[in-house]
Image: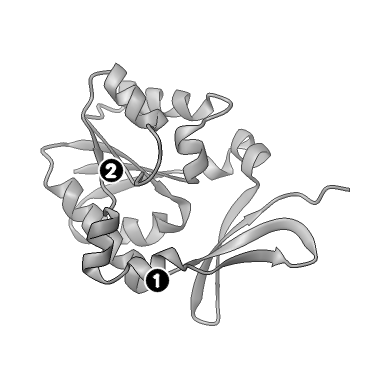
Amino acid sequence: MKIILLGLNHDVQWKDPTGHLREIIAEQINNSSVDLVAEEATGLPTTVAQRLACKLDKPWIEIDMSKTDRKLAGIDDALTNRLTHPIDPFENMGSRCLYLPQEDGIREAAWVSRILKQRAEVVLCLCGFMHVDPFTEKLEKKGCSVQQLGVTNLPWFQDLYGKYSIVEENGERWCEMRRERLS
């Protein structure tokens, strides 16, 4: 199974104010023989990918765990209280969000399982940016080939949401969302 993986923020998944995400998704569906669209989108309104999959007559699935599933797995409290804080408490330059290896790992394993249960050869998958590398590792361990599309590196994305990066320090992994300082 081939997975085309887009890591991004959840805001653009359903709002897509410029239409660029829709263009990327349409291009992938039309030019890459995508036969399934999978998405981490629990709690979001109808997403761009979901609407486009419906329009193009492609199956779409939610791969994330429901709130009930998270509670049953014993991970909901940690996910609900995930540490997020400003990069600099004195300047509005962005924020950092902590990756939770145990809790996020359980979620990502569920995503892999849900995707592998589908009868698909090429899957377009959208998830939060902080999950891209660990999720890729899990997919590859199950024999999938993964192609990561760097949406967060594109100028339109950075103009809207800033620069995304993964920071690893003191044994922790953070997703950093840095905006340009306004003068």
146 left or right, relative to 96: left
Q: Residues within 10 Å of mark 1 (few under 14, many from 20)?
A: some
| Mark carried by residue 78 | 1
Q: Residue at horizontal 23%, vertical 19%?
A: 57
Could you tell me if residue 138 is visible in this image? no
Is 97 in front, or is 156? 97
Q: Earlier in the sequence, mark 1 or mark 2?
A: 2
Residue at position x 67%, y 38% from top? 159
Packing grade of label 2 (10 A; few <14, some 14-19, many >=20) is: many
Q: Residue 29: which quarter of the image?
A: top left
Badge 2 amino acid: Ile
Q: Is residue 66 left or right of residue 18?
A: left
C-beta proximity under 8 Å, tags 1 and 2 = no
Which residue is label 2 attached to?
A: 3
Residue at 80 percent across and 51 percent down: it is 181
Up-down: is 83 above or below 38? Answer: below
Query: How is colour applied across the structure in the image?
Result: one colour
Residue 149 in the image: state x and y as whole percent. Answer: 44, 41
Task: Quote the CA–CA distance across marks 1 and 2.
Answer: 28 Å
Q: Residue furthest bottom?
A: 170
Please tell me whether mark 1 sits on a helix, a strand or a loop.
Answer: helix
Whether 84 is drawn above or below 136: the answer is below
Name the front one of labels 1 and 2.
1
Badge 1 amino acid: Ala
Q: Residue at x 53, y 69 (%)?
A: 83
The answer to whether one can see residue 149 in this image is yes
Which quarter of the image is occupied by the N terminus? top left
